[in-house]
Amino acid sequence: MLAAGTAMLAALLYKMDAAAALASVSLVGAGFFLLIGQELVAHAFNSLGWRYSIAPELAGKIKFKDVLLMRIAGDGVNYLTPSATLAGEWAKAVMMGSEHPLDERLSSVALAKITQTLAMAATSLAGICWALAAHLDFGRLGPQIRNGGWLLAAIVGFIVFLEVRAGKTRTESHAPKDKGSAGVWEQMKNVDRTMMAFMRLYPARFALSVACFLAAYLWGAFEAYWICRFLTVPVAVSTALLIEMLAVFLDGIFFAVPGKAGTQEATKAAIFGALGYNPQTGLAFGLVRHIREITWAAAGFALYYFRRRGQRG
């Protein structure tokens, strides 16, 4: 997927004139300080979303600053590793520290993943409905949606295959054969029970978690608005919001591509084309956003490394 995404980016740069796209990116200049800095607001909303997915008795023991730093670090691991955004979730659970029960740590990151997915689905659905009402040219978005659909189908098929295979193994053995596997299996059941208990006992926190992640997604419209202004293609706030909603939808489809290689630029070119703008502007938009994302991901990955080294020390 990384190779395919990189090839897609190379093809886009060749087809749409790489020199012109890079010249457009250079127009941002000092604006990169604003674009990189404003992402801290999204990180804060995402951290609140995770914090609300943690049981109150455990959340009270962890400072918000620590939740924020762990969220940034985990996002960096997710972005830069080919793990379909799962390695960072395990990293977050590990960084919470062994003084907290493992099932509570794992259930908190799993619940945060669920509430974030619900927020992403709500944002995507709203964007699609808005685009349909505005009679957008979905012909330009069609290839992206179709390719993403095939990718999602392949991932789901692979997961189903693994689940069926694991189910047969459990049926044949009737129980884990060794103490270690039995312990892991029991631990996963504990995580499941903890998650169900949380949703039953704290429905308000569950809803607040969804709301915070939703706010983080919608905040992306602020960045979209300013990127367009820096690229000398000013748009209305409503247009920036629609760009972001459609971006959330397409980014969600291609979530498994490491570093959004190629997909960031391809999807933004398709969105801008569908909105009636020059697709090359969308390509430049994707490159600018990629620079911001890589900057934060690198910082998060470094933060994870130093935090883990501190924990081991």
Image (cartoon, grey):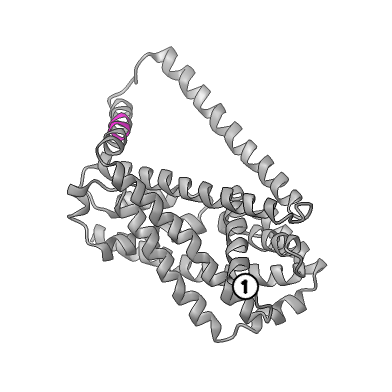
**Residue tagged 1:** 236
Q: Is residue 83 visible?
A: no
Query: Which of the pair 257/118 is nearer the observer?
Result: 118
Vertical placement of residue 34 versus 294, above or below: below
**What residue is at 62 percent from the left and 81 percent from the top?**
230
Q: Looking at the picture, which amino acid does disc 1 mark?
A: Ala
Query: Which of the pair 6/57 is nearer the observer?
Result: 57
Q: Secondary structure at mark 1?
A: loop
Q: Is residue 116 left or right of residue 19?
A: left
Give the magenta range: 189-193
Among all residues in the image, which is located at the extreme right? Answer: 15
The quarter of the rendered structure image containing the C terminus is: bottom left
Q: Which corner quadrant of the image does residue 178 belong to?
A: top left
> How far across and down, in percent of the image, does residue 136 sit?
74, 56
Q: Is residue 208 left or right of residue 31?
A: left
Among all residues in the image, which is located at the extreme bottom? Answer: 30
Residue 191 in the magenta stretch? The answer is: yes
**Is most of the magenta stretch helix, strand or loop?**
helix
Q: Residues within 10 Å of mark 1 (few under 14, many from 20)?
A: few
> How far across and down, in percent of the image, does residue 228 sit?
63, 75
Residue 45 in the magenta stretch? The answer is: no
